[in-house]
Image (cartoon, rainbow, N blue to C red):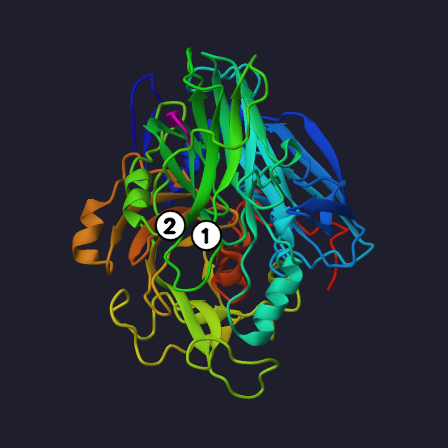
C-alpha cells in the first residue's frame, strides 16, 4: 500500500487494504438523519394511448414518488400491499451494507408480501451519492411500480462539478396497453417471446409520436431558461429495452453513472440500459434557434426477435416563450436500432473520477476468477410441458449463465443461509466456467438446451473477485445488461469476440475504471468486472431485461460472514414476510 502525502490516495492490491481504504473514508459518511416514507401499493386508473386500465401504483402515482435522502441517512420505508398480487421492493444500486434483509428480490432476500401484508425496509445509505431508483422485484410488476431514489451529498459537500441551476429527474419507461403480468404469463405458457410494449415514456408520458397521444397532457415538458445549466437525472426503468437518448441541438455532459462520479465527458447521444442511471448536464442556449426542441428515446437492440421499434418524444421548452407546438419540433438524429458502434463509442468514455476525495478502489489482485457465458438457450418440447412450444425449432425459450438456468426457490435463500438450512433449497456448486467450451460468438453448438437449478457461488468474506461476462451467439448475439445486487463493481475491461485471457488481461484499466452496479455485456463481446465480497448475504446477479430474467438468466453469490462482529449478517427483522 502506498499513500501519497497530503492527498491520502490509496493504491490497494489486497482485500485487507481495500477494507482499510473504505474505513478511512467513513468519517465523511457518518450518521445523517432518518428519513421515513410510506408506500401504499394500490390499483389506480390510468389512461395512455386511448387505453384506460387499472395498474399497480405506489400511493396512486405513476411513476411512483421520489425518495430523497443524503449520504449517511437512514431510510425507512413502510410498505403496505393492498393489491391482489404478491410484491417486494428493491432499492436498485443501494449497497445494503449488513442490511441484506432490505434488498428486496423475491425469494432471494425475502419472501414476498402477500395481499394485505406489510413490511418495513430499513437501511442506511453508506458511501453513495447520486441517482438510483426503486422498483418492484416480483414478476413484471416493476413496469408501473417504480420511482427515483436521489441521494444528495452530505450538507456542505459540493458536487465535483459546477452546481446546476436546477435538477430534473427523467424516468424512461415502457407502456403496455395490455397487462404486463398477462404478457409474461402468456409468454411462459407458449414458450415463445412476449408481446412487446406499445410505447416508450418520459416520466410516464409517451408524447406526440404515438396515435392518440398528441395532447399536452400526454407529453412531458422540461422548461428551461436561456443560459442556465440543468442536471438531468436519467433512469432507464424500461422492462426490456436499452435506449438511445438525445436532445436536439444540445450537447450533454455526463458527470455520474449509477451513483458514482465519472470524469465529465460530452456527448450528443447517450445509451442507457435498463437498470442504469446517469446524471448529465445540459446548458440551455443563450440565443436558441427555436422555442422548443425534441428530447427523444429509441431502442438499441440486436435481438432476432420482435421489439418495440418506436421513438418517444418529450419537449425541451425555452421560457418565457408561449407553449410550443408539439409536432414539427427540431428532432435529434438517433442511431439505427442495431448500431453497436455508436454504443461502443459512447461507453468507452466512462472513467471513474479517481480523485483524492473519490478514489477508484479497484482490486489490483484477484483471489477468485470466474468466466460466465451469458445468453439465451432452449428447453426441449417434451412432457411435462404446461403450455406449447413456440420457441425456435419447436422448443421453448430459456436463458442461462454457464448453461444453468436459474430456478427461483419457494423460500428465501437469505433465510435458508441464515438458518444454515440449505438442503432442498440451494446447491453451492454454480460452475466457475462453462462445463462445455465452444466458440461463444461463432457458430452456435448443435445442442442449445440448458440445465436448471438453484445454484449459488459461495464466497469467503473479503474475497476479491473477477468475473468475465461473455456474450454468446445462441439464439442470436445480443447485449445483456447485468445487475449485481449488494455491490458496486469496477469495469476493468471489455472487447468483442471471445475473451482471450492471454492478451486481454494486459489491456485492463486498473487506474480509473468506471464503477457501476449494472453493465451491458456487449453484443458478441465480453466485459470484465471486479469487486470485493465484503458484504455478507445472498446477492442475485441477473439480466435486467425482464424477459431474460423470467427465462432464468441469473445466479446468486453467497457471501459468508467475516470474523468480526461488524462483518456478520444480522438477524432478520421481526416483520419479515414468510413463505
Q: Are marks 2 and 1 in contact (CB under 8 Å)?
A: yes
Mark toward the start of the polypeptide (2 vs 1): 1
Query: Separation of disc 2 and disc 1 at Cα?
Result: 8 Å
Frontmost residue, 561 versus 31: 31
Examine the rendering and report whether any part of residue 129 can be seen.
no
Q: Which residue is mark 1?
A: 309
State the residue at coordinates (68%, 39%): 64
**Residue 337, disc:** 2
Q: In the rendering, at what x and y percent does residue 161 appear? A: 42, 18
**Residue 1, disc:** none
The verdict on residue 403 being magenta is: no
For residue 191, above or below residue 101: below
- Circle 2 sits in a helix, a strand or a loop, which is it? loop
Q: In the rendering, at what x and y percent does residue 96 appear? A: 57, 43
Indicate left or right for 117 with 547 as reference.
right
Q: In the rendering, at what x and y percent does residue 516 appear? A: 42, 41
State the residue at coordinates (56%, 38%): 208
Q: Residues within 10 Å of mark 2 (few under 14, many from 20)?
A: some
Amino acid at each position: 500500500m502506498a499513500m501519497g502525502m497530503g492527498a491520502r490516495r490509496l493504491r490497494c492490491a489486497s482485500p485487507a487494504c481495500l477494507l482499510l481504504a473504505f474505513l478511512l473514508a467513513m468519517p465523511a459518511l457518518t450518521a445523517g438523519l432518518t428519513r421515513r416514507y410510506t408506500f401504499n401499493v394500490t390499483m389506480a386508473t390510468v389512461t395512455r394511448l386511448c387505453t384506460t386500465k387499472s395498474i399497480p401504483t405506489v400511493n396512486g402515482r405513476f411513476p411512483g414518488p421520489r425518495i430523497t435522502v443524503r449520504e449517511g441517512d437512514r431510510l425507512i420505508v413502510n410498505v403496505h400491499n393492498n393489491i391482489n398480487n404478491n410484491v417486494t421492493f428493491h432499492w436498485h444500486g443501494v449497497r445494503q451494507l449488513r442490511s441484506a434483509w432490505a434488498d428486496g428480490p423475491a425469494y432471494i432476500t425475502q419472501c414476498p408480501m402477500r395481499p394485505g401484508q406489510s413490511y418495513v425496509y430499513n437501511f442506511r445509505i453508506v458511501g453513495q451519492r447520486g441517482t438510483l431508483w426503486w422498483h418492484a422485484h416480483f414478476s413484471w410488476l416493476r413496469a408501473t411500480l417504480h420511482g427515483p431514489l436521489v441521494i444528495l451529498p452530505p450538507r456542505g459537500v459540493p458536487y465535483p462539478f459546477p452546481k446546476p441551476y436546477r435538477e430534473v429527474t427523467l424516468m424512461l419507461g415502457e407502456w403496455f396497453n395490455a397487462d404486463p403480468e398477462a404478457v409474461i404469463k402468456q409468454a411462459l405458457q407458449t414458450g415463445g417471446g412476449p408481446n412487446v410494449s406499445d410505447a416508450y415514456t418520459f416520466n410516464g408520458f409517451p408524447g406526440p409520436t404515438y396515435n392518440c397521444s398528441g395532447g399536452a397532457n400526454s407529453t412531458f415538458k422540461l422548461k428551461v431558461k436561456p443560459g442556465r445549466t440543468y442536471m438531468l437525472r436519467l433512469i432507464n426503468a424500461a422492462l426490456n429495452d436499452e435506449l438511445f437518448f438525445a436532445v436536439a441541438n444540445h450537447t450533454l455532459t455526463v458527470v455520474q453513472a449509477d451513483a458514482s462520479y465519472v470524469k465529465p465527458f460530452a456527448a450528443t447521444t447517450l445509451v442507457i440500459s435498463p437498470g442504469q442511471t446517469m446524471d448529465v448536464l445540459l446548458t440551455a442556449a443563450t440565443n436558441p434557434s427555436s422555442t422548443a426542441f425534441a428530447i427523444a428515446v429509441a431502442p438499441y437492440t440486436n435481438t432476432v426477435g420482435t421489439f418495440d421499434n418506436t421513438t418517444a418524444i418529450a419537449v425541451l421548452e425555452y421560457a418565457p416563450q408561449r407553449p410550443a407546438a408539439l409536432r414539427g419540433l427540431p428532432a435529434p438524429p438517433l442511431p439505427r436500432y442495431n448500431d453497436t458502434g455508436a454504443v461502443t463509442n459512447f461507453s468507452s468514455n466512462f472513467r471513474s473520477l479517481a480523485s483524492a476525495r473519490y478514489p477508484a478502489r479497484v482490486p489490483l489482485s484477484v483471489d477468485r476468477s470466474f468466466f460466465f457465458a451469458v445468453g439465451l438457450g432452449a428447453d426441449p418440447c417434451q412432457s411435462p410441458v404446461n403450455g406449447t412450444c413456440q420457441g425456435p425449432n419447436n422448443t421453448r425459450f430459456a436463458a442461462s449463465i454457464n448453461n444453468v438456468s436459474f430456478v427461483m426457490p419457494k423460500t428465501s435463500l437469505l433465510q435458508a443461509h441464515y438458518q444454515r438450512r440449505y438442503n432442498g433449497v440451494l446447491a453451492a456448486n454454480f460452475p466457475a466456467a462453462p462445463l462445455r467450451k465452444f466458440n461463444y460468438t461463432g457458430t452456435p453448438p448443435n445442442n442449445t438446451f440448458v440445465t436448471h437449478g438453484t445454484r449459488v457461488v459461495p464466497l469467503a468474506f473479503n474475497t476479491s473477485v473477477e468475473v468475465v461476462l461473455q456474450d454468446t451467439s445462441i439464439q442470436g448475439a445480443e447485449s445483456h445488461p447485468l445487475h449485481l445486487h449488494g455491490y458496486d463493481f469496477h469495469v476493468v475491461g471489455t472487447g468483442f469476440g471471445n475473451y482471450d485471457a492471454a492478451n486481454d488481461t494486459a489491456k485492463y484499466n486498473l487506474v480509473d475504471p468506471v464503477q457501476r452496479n449494472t453493465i451491458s455485456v456487449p453484443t458478441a463481446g465480453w466485459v470484465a468486472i471486479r469487486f470485493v465480497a465484503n458484504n455478507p448475504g445472498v446477492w442475485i446477479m441477473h439480466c435486467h431485461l425482464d424477459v431474460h430474467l423470467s427465462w432464468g438468466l441469473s445466479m446468486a453469490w453467497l457471501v459468508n460472514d467475516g470474523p468480526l462482529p461488524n462483518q456478520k449478517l444480522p438477524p432478520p427483522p421481526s416483520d419479515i414476510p414468510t413463505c
